[in-house]
Image (tube, helix red, strand yellow):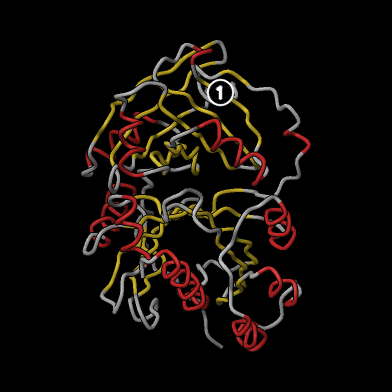
Amino acid sequence: MSTLSLDPHPAPERRDFMPLHGIDHIELWVGNAAQAAYYLRHAFGFTEVAYAGLETGRRDRVSHVLQQGRIRLVLTGALVDGTEIGDHQRRHGDGVKVVALSVPSADAAYREAVARGATGLRAPYELRDGDGVVRMAEIAAYGETVHTFVERGDYGGRFLPGFAAVAHDGDASQPRLLAGIDHVVANVELGAMERWVTFYEEVFGMTELIHFSDEAISTEYSALMSKVVTNGDGRVKFPINEPAEGARKSQIDEYLEFYGGPGVQHIAVSTRDIVATVEALAARGVSFLRTPESYYEDVPARVGEIDQSLEDLRRLGILVDRDDEGYLLQIFTKPLGDRPTLFLEIIERHGARGFGEGNFKALFEAIEREQALRGNL
């Protein structure tokens, strides 16, 4: 019988110099914030909880704050010509501008980030109203993406000072389909993935969770490489993709072309019942990538026993994969806007910590079929 041997001189516990509570919100800069908010409310079941615009004293931009479970999205559009928001939307189309991180201290987070090599965009500042105070700060990430540090422990309002609370207007009766943000995926240019992995390791103290080579993520026509970084408790996970050499243009190349550079490729949102969620979303008009029938032939042998009906997964096109700790189910929407860029992933985890690597071939073949229809493969 073996015995457990304890090191008499254990290494000192590593200090968490960048504690993160999670993702505070994600802000998208869009061409028409009112219409984007309407679509996400009625197609995905979000509730509008706060608003800022002309009626609240803003003259250059309007923002609609949507919430569902632990997910908070901000849809922001320009009100006048010549703004940074309008210029950004013209170059990139609708897309993610800010991935905001909840922190215990915005001042400490900004100070640590800049000292460790991040480019500071806005030093810590304060927003205040009758509901309290929020401290924030901003640093640069890949492309034109921004990470905002949000310290809201002393604030009791709906979102931020300067925003008015919005009556639910019937939204509250909608079924709760989505629970939280599982991960946020970045696409970067060829050769840049390792630099951004190092950025998150050095600036945030994150660690590399998984590495996928171009051999693991490839089809007959294209390939990509990906690494996943995560903070200590796994609340924040950032997969980072770059293109790899292939016979034809990869999905990452297509994104980079139509987005006009690096940015957020997709947001993965969790659900507690993916079958019911996908049925509801499809009934509301959401379009998903379709999975070929042949994919499901080897699922029982590859994945083993699961709680869901294989027939339901086949009917809805839901993918399933297993790792050493459990299994997961996932499905991907088609692009949310006109450009083949930003989309959503719906994911339900049953212990699995992976990202569906067993599904990569089927997923990327489905994406390539859509690329071919667009003339971009």
Q: Nearer the viewer, residue 12 or 39?
A: 39
Q: Is residue 233 visible?
A: no
Residue that extends furthest to the right in the rendered view of this protein: 173
Residue 187, percent across and down?
A: 34, 57
Up-down: is 171 above or below 217? above
Residue at x-position 28% and y-position 72%: 244
Residue 362, percent across and down?
A: 51, 77
Up-down: is 47 above or below 258? above
Up-down: is 360 above or below 60? below
Residue 347, percent across and down?
A: 60, 60
Is 28 left or right of 17, judged from the image as shown?
right
Q: Quadrant of the N terminus?
A: bottom right
Q: Quadrant of the C terminus?
A: bottom left
Residue at x-position 45% and y-position 67%: 373
Q: Nearer the viewer, residue 330 or 248?
A: 248
Q: Is residue 4 visible?
A: yes
Q: Which quadrant of the structure image shows residue 201?
A: bottom left
Three-letter residue code for mark 1? Tyr
Q: Which quadrant of the structure image shows residue 212?
A: bottom left
Is 308 left or right of 364, judged from the image as shown?
right
Residue 352, percent across and down?
A: 58, 69
Up-down: is 116 above or below 357? above
Is 274 left or right of 23, judged from the image as shown?
right
Which residue corresponds to mark 1?
A: 51
Helix, strand or loop for disc 1: strand
